[in-house]
Image (cartoon, rainbow, N blue to C red):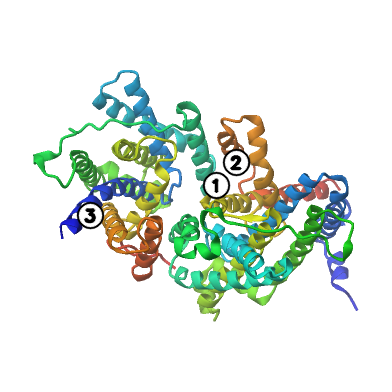
Amino acid sequence: MELFLHQLLAGIATGGIYACMALAVVMIYQSIDHFNFAQGEMAMFSTYIAWQLMAWGCPYWIAFILTIVISFIGGVVIERGLFKPIRNAPVLSHIIVFIAMFSILNSVAGFTWEYTIKSFPSPFPSQPLFNNRLIGAHDLGMIAITLILLVLLYVLFRHTRLGLAMRAAAANPDSARLVGIRVGWMVALGWGLAAAIGAVAGMMIAPVVFLEPNMMLGILLYGLAGAVVGGLTSPVGAVLGGFAVGIVENLAGTFVPVVGKELKLTIALVLIVAVLMVKPSGLFGRAAVSRV
Amino acid sequence: MTTREDIADSAVAVPRLGGLTLRTWQRVLTIIVLLIALALPAVLKNFHVFQLTLVMIYAIAILGLNLLTGINGQFSLGHSAFYAIGAYTTAILMDRFGVPYFLTLPVAGIVCLIAGFLFGLPALRLEGLYLALATFALAVATPQLLKLSILEHWTGGVQGIVIIKPDAPFGLPLSQDRWLYYFTLAILIFMFLAAMRLVASRTGRALKAIRDNPLAAKAMGIDTAFYKSMAFGVSALYTGVAGSLGAIVVQFVAPDSFTFFLAVSFLVGLVVGGVGSIPGALIGGLFIMYIPNLAEQVSKGLAWAVYGAILILVIYVMPTGAAGFVRLVTGRLTRLMSSNR
């Protein structure tokens, strides 16, 4: 029982990482109706920017905020510069550009900051909170920040005109344009937001997995699994899905014999396929209805 | 009796380029490419012959992906898995059972057909993005599954399997690489012809109908579930045969040769060559074979950044791939010519 509880809490802790990433995934999906395969690399790049700022002597929280701002601008610039010119190209061409971005960001990060593993500071105290022995302060802090992000996004999307305009632009670009929404800029804004959330996720994840150009690859897959399990249309679902993936991964790794350490990524696969089989729109998502 | 050509000649609307119809141009080009392909090994070094063999193998794999994505409209980011299954089937048969290499090809094809069909069944419920995600997960999981300790007896675990390169049969005076080049070329021609027949057939029309409008296709009485899973199966068969050839040519299989990166390469080849175009697969094969090398020559440290930049450039210049680009150019040229007349 002790072991079970330990693994459960460890699962929630790693689940927090996936939840962060899943949230970023769902965000960009909601605002551009595509999935960005370079999302993880964008987050990685932002984390390097934060690291660089701190190496130049910036205090943590100033670097944190600066990185978010830089990432936001970066996201908008990428959309305006790279994706606006090929707006009418087929979806597959977009995916190829995502792949190109992936390799560019990865390669440039490796070239600029080298492939050696760097440690990244955590803003939270290293002593566990309330002297408990089950969950570290950083894990708790990470979960708290994920939840704060979630609330902020909820407020933005449900209770502001801007959020409404962004949702409209994603759901039905033509009609949105007819009622005077600047669809192009809404999409760019969505990119900026997704990049900013990715930056937060990266800075929260880096103290746990350490900073290196390939740090996001496995995490992106788990984040995806979380997003799909929870439903790509629901930010709350994505966060819960992220936690679920973390818990399942840890428990299966401990209690199922052969699966153990060898097949951790495969668990994500099985989870994705299993959920999609039973409920294609995810546990908390809405089924897409289209007019024939 | 009038043949099809007569009718085409008498019709006014047939576009012509330099006095020949586009169809004739196509035939002439095909023959020229074939002749060059036959003559190349005589003038190239063994290593370049080996590279060209890989180009053809990639072309077969891309063609497989094209049948699924271009013709049937289903996405896959997981074709490295089928390539791996084909490669491992051949390697295990040759290494553990001493089966001759050419006999392993059909076996690998059938194994992949079944694997693809089975994966296609759950994929029926998934569309577009969700299917891409599920296949993405498949691609990421494949190397891990191959490394699994309980399968090590068969797969050789992390070390993989080394196989012996076959000699030319009947005492032909060809080096091993040249023989495999011609062997692969023969398979490639067979696979391409088969794909063209398939696309032009009743089945091909059903597949395209499902791509263009699944609901209408269903209403017309097309068994969408069957055709969609079958498209997955046939696509996996093509990619599996490519994987099998790849194992023979490279003489080696190991889990880390079949990562997600390979699946992405196939996808890049597909889009660069032209989605839905059968000859485009060859262009795609050339691209994914030579462009990474070219990028490395430009800059060693930033090779992948250069590759990415080239990729973006290609998409900007030809958003619909090489095939779409050729269509565009020939269209413009014919209009230009006819307006001059």
Q: Amino acid at mark 2?
A: Leu
Query: Looking at the image, which residue is at 40% across and 56% down?
Result: A262
**Gap between marks 2 and 3 measured at Cα:** 44 Å
What mark, if any, has residue A96 been given in the picture?
A: 1
Instruction: In this rendered view, identify the residue nearer to me: B287 or B150.
Output: B150
Disc 2 marks which residue?
A: B311
Disc 3 target residue: A7
In the depicted structure, whether residue A42 falls above or below residue A177: above
Q: State the separation of the CA atoms marked 1 and 3.
A: 39 Å
Q: Residues within 10 Å of mark 2 (few under 14, many from 20)?
A: many
Label 2 SS: helix
Q: Nearer the viewer, residue B96 or B339?
A: B96
Secondary structure category for the residue under label 1: helix
With B112 as the anchor, is A101 left or right in this view? left
- Observer-nearest residue: B31 or B177? B177
Q: Position of residue A83 (x, y in %)?
A: 50, 41
- Classify the position of the N terminus of chain B by image quarter: bottom right
Residue at position x 40%, y 37% from top?
Answer: A44
Callout 1 environment at 10 Å: few (<14), some (14 to 19), or many (20+)?
Answer: many
Chain identifier of the residue bearing label 3 in the image: A
Disc 1: host chain: A
Residue extending furthest bottom?
B221
Q: Residue A292 is drawn in which quadrant?
A: bottom left
Amino acid type at circle 1 is Ile
Q: Residue at x 67, y 57 (%)?
A: B246
